[in-house]
């Protein structure tokens, strides 16, 4: 088995501890936070496979409680199917393009996402428009996942526009990301990216995520959510700018 150097180990533990806290508090952010932190030190190509095990486990926990799952499966089944198709098609592109392109896509999308959220801009999709928007958004989210590592970010944004209740949103996002991660892991395995080193680091990431989730859940009822979200978005902008900077060096 390959040895893991101390810098890589510290980066992985820190990334998933911080990401776990954010996910526990907000119900989202595990892939984006962990990928952004790891991307500054390890590079996105190495970071993406590490996401698999903690993402599967965290999202399994998230969507399995507290409400019944089947209504979410029926309501969002088509959008999740479209996302999985996009992931499977586009994952091969990730390892066929220059690292500069991957870094640029990742950094620009995260900065735009964080900036829009900081401005307080809101967009609402009425229930009757879900079928019209769902499949295109799902497919695009899957394609973006495959080429950048941003796990279903547009789909999560879309779920926010539906103005779901807080628990329903957290559960629906967890279900979508769980399904997508399983498909993504299979696609990455097919591309030879899930090496022994990747599986090892992914397993090492699990305890920090569990600790972070527990801390985040406790924080959820004790802090102002708007202030915490703003701090997270500013943090993402700073780190993503560094990912972009590395792409140009």
Image (cartoon, grey):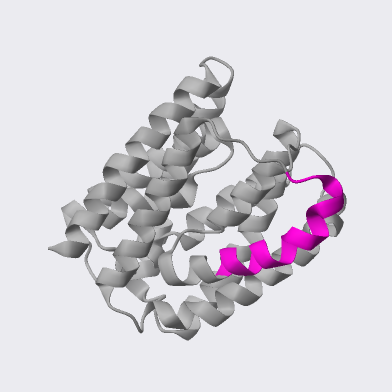
**214, above or below 9, in the image:** above
Expressed as whole percent of the image width and height from the top left, the position of residue 14 reads: 31, 42
Residue 88 belongs to the span the image colors magenta: no
Expressed as whole percent of the image width and height from the top left, the position of residue 187 reads: 53, 79
Is 137 left, or right, of 200 in this rendering?
Answer: right
Q: Quadrant of residue 178?
A: bottom right
Magenta stretch bounds: 125-142
The kind of secondary structure the magenta stretch mainly shows is helix
**32, above or below 4, in the image:** above
Is 222 left, or right, of 168 in this rendering?
Answer: left
Q: Give the residue at x 56% y 73%.
A: 87
**60, above or below 188, in the image:** above
Is 32 left, or right, of 135 in this rendering?
Answer: left
Q: Give the residue at x 44% y 84%.
A: 191
Q: Is residue 42 visible?
A: yes
Is 166 left, or right, of 13 in this rendering?
Answer: right
Q: Give the residue at x 72% y 70%.
A: 81
């Amino acid at each position: 088995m390959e040895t893991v150097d101390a810098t890589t180990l510290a980066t992985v533990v820190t990334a998933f501890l911080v990401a776990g806290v954010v996910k526990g508090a907000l119900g989202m952010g595990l892939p984006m936070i962990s990928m952004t932190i790891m991307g500054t030190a390890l590079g996105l190509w190495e970071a993406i496979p590490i996401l698999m095990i903690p993402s599967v486990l965290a999202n399994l926990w998230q969507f399995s409680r507290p409400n019944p799952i089947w209504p979410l499966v029926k309501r969002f089944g088509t959008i999740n199917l479209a996302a999985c198709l996009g992931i499977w098609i586009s994952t091969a592109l990730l390892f066929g393009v220059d690292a500069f392109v991957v870094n640029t896509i990742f950094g620009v999308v995260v900065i735009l996402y964080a900036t829009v959220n900081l401005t307080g801009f809101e967009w609402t999709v009425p229930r009757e428009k879900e079928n019209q928007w769902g499949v295109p958004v799902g497919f695009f989210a899957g394609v973006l996942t495959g080429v950048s590592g941003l796990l279903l970010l547009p789909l999560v944004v879309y779920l926010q526009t539906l103005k779901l209740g807080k628990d329903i949103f957290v559960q629906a996002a967890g279900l979508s990301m769980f399904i997508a991660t399983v498909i993504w892991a299979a696609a990455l395995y097919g591309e030879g990216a899930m090496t022994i080193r990747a599986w090892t680091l992914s397993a090492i990431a699990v305890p920090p995520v569990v600790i972070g989730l527990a801390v985040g859940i406790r924080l959820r009822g004790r802090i102002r959510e708007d202030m915490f979200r703003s701090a997270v978005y500013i943090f993402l902008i700073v780190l993503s700018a560094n990912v972009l900077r590395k792409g140009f060096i």
